[in-house]
Amino acid sequence: MTPVLSPVWADPQTTARLCVDSRATVPAWVATTRDARNTGLLRTTGLDGALLIERCGSVHTIGMQYPIDVVFLSAERRVVDVVTMRPGRIGRPRLRARSVVELPAAAAARLGIVRGSVVTVEEVGAGLTPDS
């Protein structure tokens, strides 16, 4: 069976990158529609990059097959909290969060994402040079 490493609703050939404090890092997809936000990473077997879910203050991992890091972002895209969630869990809401970034477990630390970091998603063609 072929691994599914990007959201099933997304173009796996994305040119967007997750940026941490203006530094381009890993491929990223953005869930802006209701269907994309509701589906998220369901039906994936892993993640090669990051998923930004707009208008979201809490997540769950029910139906997931692997643990993820969840990065909660304020309206200004500043990191409010970072947690690792195992499959089958319901996370508690973060009242200041307006969006979340989902990453493979341990990726947030590897990318240097900490409280106070600014996290955005940018097109690579927008003057960014990806680090990966």
Image (tube, helix red, strand yellow):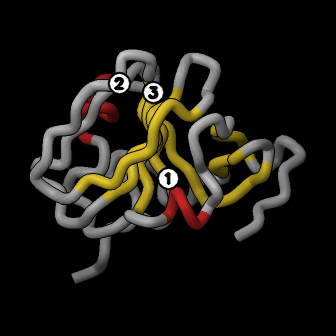
Mark 3–mark 2 Cα distance, whole angstroms, equals: 10 Å
Q: Residue at x 22, y 51 (%)?
A: 42
Q: Which mark is residue 50?
A: 1
Percent position of residue 87, x then y: 16, 58
Quarter of the image with the N terminus is: bottom left
Mark 1–mark 3 Cα distance, whole angstroms, equals: 13 Å
Q: Nearer the viewer, residue 20 or 14?
A: 20
Residue lying farthest to the right in this orientation: 127
Q: Residue at x 44, y 55 (%)?
A: 103
Location of mark 2 (residue): 94
In this picture, is 115 found above or below 67? above
Q: Which mark is residue 99?
A: 3
Q: Nearer the viewer, residue 39 or 1?
A: 39
In this picture, is 98 found above or below 41? above
**Is 49 situated left or right of 46 in this image?**
right
Q: Provide the secondary structure element on which disc 2 rests.
A: loop
Percent position of residue 111, x then y: 62, 60
Q: Nearer the viewer, residue 85 or 18?
A: 85
- The answer to which quarter of the image holds residue 132 is bottom right
Q: Provide the secondary structure element on which disc 1 rests.
A: strand
Q: Residues within 10 Å of mark 2 (few under 14, many from 20)?
A: some
Mark 1–mark 2 Cα distance, whole angstroms, equals: 19 Å
Q: Earlier in the sequence, mark 1 or mark 2?
A: 1
Q: Residues within 10 Å of mark 3 (few under 14, many from 20)?
A: many
Percent position of residue 115, x then y: 57, 39
Q: Provide the secondary structure element on which disc 3 rests.
A: strand
